[in-house]
Amino acid sequence: MKISARRVEKATILDVTGNIDMSNSPEVRKALLREIREKGVTRVILNLTAVGYIDSSGVASLVEGLKASRDLGSRFVLFGLNDSAREVLKISRLLKLFEVYDDETQAIQAA
Amino acid sequence: MRVPSEEPEPTMNPIAAKQPTDMKNFSKLSRAFLLKLELRSHPTLLCVIRGALEPLMETLGFSDENNRAIIRAVDEAVSNIMRHSYHGRMDQPIELYCNRLRRRADGKIEKGVEFLLFDCGPAVDPTKIPARPLDEIRPGGLGLHIIRRSMDSVEYKRAGRLNRLRLVKYARPSKGGYESAEEKPS
């Protein structure tokens, strides 16, 4: 799994490539909290277009990102979820908590 | 010139080495299984399990949705063993068996799949681990909930000195009808 950050307008987009599971979810958590807490980025967008699978530990990392952004009054937005990612969030009853968009353009406009 | 000697291979069947009596029974069972995986409790091996199961479930004719549910449940179950049974130790043995099932439902044969997971950790009944309330927004505690929601049956049993988790999933007719040509009504 790889994570890279890029700046688009006033938002930081984190592009994730690969699967997120117990072996690497701490990296996702770290990257999110670095942007939200350490750098104080007010609009963080997570691009999951190239993510095939997310397990419960990956979901937990997203929840941590969401909580951190709420605590600091910033925005945390997701886009590009495939069926698998959408299902695991739905099963966990978390899908409605996140701002989820289909593509990058929508996510940037929303953030 | 001396050729450096290689490290000896680890025991081929670590659980069997530790539990010979129990494994005699399991090895009898294994002849009937579609797939048997022996692995260490290293999280990087989770992708190997998913990679093995996806084409197998496709071959068995499960829909994409069921395939994802099965992979999700087995992945979470193995993660739970690594986390809760072995407490993050990465060199402990795990065995996974997969078998095909059939049952009669509403006069039709319904196909299914069964997974048996064995580990040598202390007795931990995952079905009794309280899942966190889903209305709480906090990380963690979702694995068991995901397993229960993804499978039809989740059973834990202490088998000798091993933990045995049995997961069962039956195919459901997909939105477009039946999942495989052989089960389409004529």
Image (cartoon, rainbow, N blue to C red):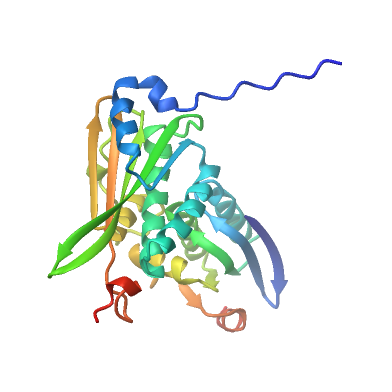
The answer to whether residue B6 is left or right of residue A56 is right
Q: Quadrant of residue B162?
A: top left
The answer to whether residue B81 is left or right of residue A46 is left
The answer to whether residue B20 is left or right of residue A101 is left
The answer to whether residue B177 is left or right of residue A89 is left
Residue at x-position 48% and y-position 61% = A71
User: Can residue A59 be seen in the rendering of this structure?
Assistant: no
User: Can residue A31 be seen in the rendering of this structure?
Assistant: yes
Residue B186 position, x and y percent, is 24, 82
Farthest residue to the left: give it. Answer: B106
Residue at x-position 66% and y-position 69% = A12
Residue at x-position 87% and y-position 16% = B1
> Which is more toward the observer, B150 or B124?
B150
Residue A9 position, x and y percent, is 70, 78
> Which is more toward the observer, A32 or B21?
B21
Farthest residue to the right: give it. Answer: B1
> Which is more toward the observer, B76 or A16?
B76
Q: Is residue B109 above or below residue B1?
A: below
> Which is more toward the observer, A17 or A26?
A17
Residue A50 position, x and y percent, is 60, 67
Residue at x-position 51% and y-position 68% = A73
Residue A91 position, x and y percent, is 34, 64
Q: Is residue B86 above or below residue B180?
A: above
